[in-house]
Amino acid sequence: MKQLLLTKQQLIAAMISLSLGSVAQAALTINGSTETASSARLSWGGADSLSEARNIMYKSNGSAIKKVDNGYGTTNITNSSSFASSNNTARYNTTYRGAFGSSDMIPISTDSRSVAVIDAETGESIYEKDADIARPMASITKIMTAMVVLDAGLDMREEITLDPEDFVGPKRASSRLKSGDRLNRAELLLMALMKSENPAAKSLARNYPGGYNAFIRAMNRKAQDLGMTTAFFGDPTGLDKRNVASSNDLVKMVRAAGNYDVIRRFSTTKSYDFFVSNYSSGNRTYKANNTSSLVRAGDYPIGISKTGFINEAGRCVVMETRVNNRPAIIVILGANSSATRWGDAKNILNSLATRRTV
């Protein structure tokens, strides 16, 4: 995993550019670093520096092909804008040009209820288990939430204040956020993707043009545009058990998410220290770690990642990876425990590593 050493000037510029108003004084660090500015290190899942992520979010110029180095090879991402891909036909290109044959299917078994593994280049199946059955997806939902937010082309520096309604949902869920907390849209998106904070996701939906209901309609419209025929979204967090899709349809969603540089960087950020301002309770630092143990450990090449859990869904995870220079998307739904989820994931990743290259 590549880490970049920041100069004092770069860190100050990053702090200012990722902040708004009084938050501009935030001491934002990544990977729990409390070192001085001259020695602090940043790691965006093996991607480029914090300032590069900021450039992607805050620029509004035309389409471009961006080179994204996820620490395991360069990927070309064709975007209709610098921070999102609103064109559903945008291509996700990788340097790999081989094809998987039937003899290349992974000879493994998995314990999760539904699993899909596909070649991200050709779309061919590598492994399937009940992959066409719609199941609750829990916080995997937040990948769709992120795409809808980014498609809207909103100001990522706009400060948003969390309301009491952001903490009300179909289920009770723990959160370290509070009503009255103020963060900018970029920080809320990072918090939703890496830490899976539900109030952050709901606040992003509430502050969408047309409001919350318009956001939910946009989620389902996006799913339809992507050909996710089994999918339905009832809320932006995944706490709603009506949020369902098959593993094969979630492969389509993850593949589409590969066209968003911000989703790649944010979903694979290992840790981040958020400066949270609140007029009522005072300012504080919120130290957050990625919900994926695989991302935190850094032992596997992961380009996109999202975990999820509610009782109805079981333990879930989706990820994009590249093994032996071969790109793959992995979807795991309905594991009965965290150990089962990560055991299946590691089994798949290790099996991919033993397969022949083309």
Image (tube, rainbow, N blue to C red):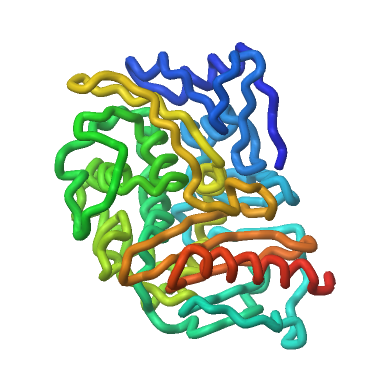
**Residue at the (47%, 61%) spot, across then down:** 88
Going by the image, does 67 lie left or right of 265?
right
Query: Does residue 352 sit above or below 25 in this rendering?
Result: below
The one of 260 and 191 positioned closer to us in this rendering: 191
Q: Position of residue 295 (x, y in %)?
A: 59, 49
Say whether residue 267 is left or right of residue 324: left
Classify residue 144 as left or right of residue 306.
left
Can you say whether 324 is above or below 189 in the image?
A: below
Residue 89 in view (yes/no)? no
Q: Residue at x 69, y 29 (%)?
A: 4
Q: Can I make out residue 13 in this image?
A: yes
Q: Residue at x 23, y 31 (%)?
A: 161
Which image quarter holds the N terminus? top right
Residue found 58% across the figure and 71% down from its top: 344
Residue furthest bottom as drawn: 102
Residue situated in front as seen by the camera: 294 or 78: 294
Where is residue 12 drawn, in percent x and y? 54, 14
Q: Quadrant of residue 312?
A: bottom left
Q: How many marks?
A: 0
Image x and y of residue 51, in percent: 57, 27
Quadrant in which residue 34 is drawn: top right
Q: Nearer the viewer, residue 191 or 327?
A: 191
**Residue 224 x %, y %:** 37, 70
179 to the left or right of 317: left
Screen quadrant of the C terminus: bottom right
- The answer to which of 341 and 122 lies nearer the viewer is 341
